[in-house]
Each structure stands twice: as C-alpha cells, then as structure tokens.
Image: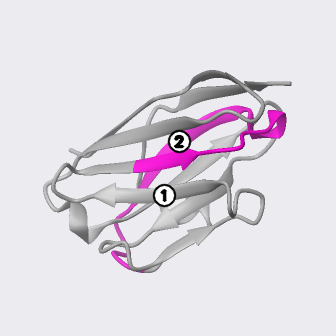
Amino acid sequence: QVQLVESGGGLVQAGGSLRLSCAASIRTFINYAMAWFRQAPGKEREFVAGIGWNSGNVFYADSVKGRFTISRDNAKNTVYLQMNSLKPEDTAVYYCAADAWSYYEVSVLTDEYSYWGQGTQVTVSS
C-alpha cells in the first residue's frame, strides 16, 4: 500500500522560505514520477512542480518558476519542494502526488496521479 506523508508547512511572511518534504512508502520509488500540487480555498487543485525518476526531467508552473525548486532523494524515498520568495498568493494546502503510469514524464493533470498525500498547509502573510 502506497502512502505519502507531507511535512514542512506553516506560517511565513511574504518574501520568506519554506521547505516541504514528502516521504513515500513505495517499494519502487524510482518507478514513479512525483509532483506537488496546491489548492487554495474556493479554487481547483493546481499543478506546482513535477520531477521524473532520475531528476533529469523537472517541470514548473509559470507562477512558481524561478522561486520554487523540486528535488528528490531516491535513497530516502522523499521528494522536496523548496519555496523561496513566497507571496500571499502561494497560500494553499500543498499536496504530494505519485504517478504510477510514468517514471519520467511529468503530467500537470490531477487525474494522472494515482496516489496523494493528506496535504500540508502553507500560509503566507503580507
């Protein structure tokens, strides 16, 4: 059974930084492309960043490009999201997701992802 557990969320002032972690209980972690999504109140869940199995393929939403960095440590079955220069509009619940259908290609579609974490709240104050 696959479990994804996010951590690292919290309250931060605009311009600050946070680092999210997602620990995955997956026997073959390298077989999964991984991604971060977020959902703000009253809005649909949206893609933030994704990474292929060997970190050679990464993709970012335009809204976070240049500020956020996704990475993974396959030895630790963990994916990270380093968030810098945070803005109030980054406030959302952030979810980790695993794509059982792809180990390299990164999809921006929520339906592509087989497994989801419970989410971690990120709040950026102005």
**Mark 1 lies on residue:** 70
Give the left or right position of residue 99, taking residue 46 as reference.
Answer: left
Q: Residue at x 61, y 54 (%)?
A: 68
In x, y percent, where is residue 41? 79, 30
In x, y percent, where is residue 88? 82, 33
User: Is residue 107 visible from the viewing direction of this image?
Assistant: no
Stretch of the chain drawn in magenta: 80-104
Q: Residue at x 45, y 52 (%)?
A: 97
Label 2: few (<14), some (14–19) or many (≥20) C-alpha neighbours in 10 Å: many
Q: Which mark is residue 106?
A: none
Is residue 92 highlighted in magenta?
yes
User: Which residue type carries mark 1?
Assistant: Ile
Location of the N terminus by quadrant is top left
Q: Which mark is residue 95?
A: 2
Examine the rendered structure and indicate whether residue 31 appears above or below residue 85: below
Examine the rendered structure and indicate whether residue 93 appears above or below residue 70: above
Location of the C terminus by quadrant is top right
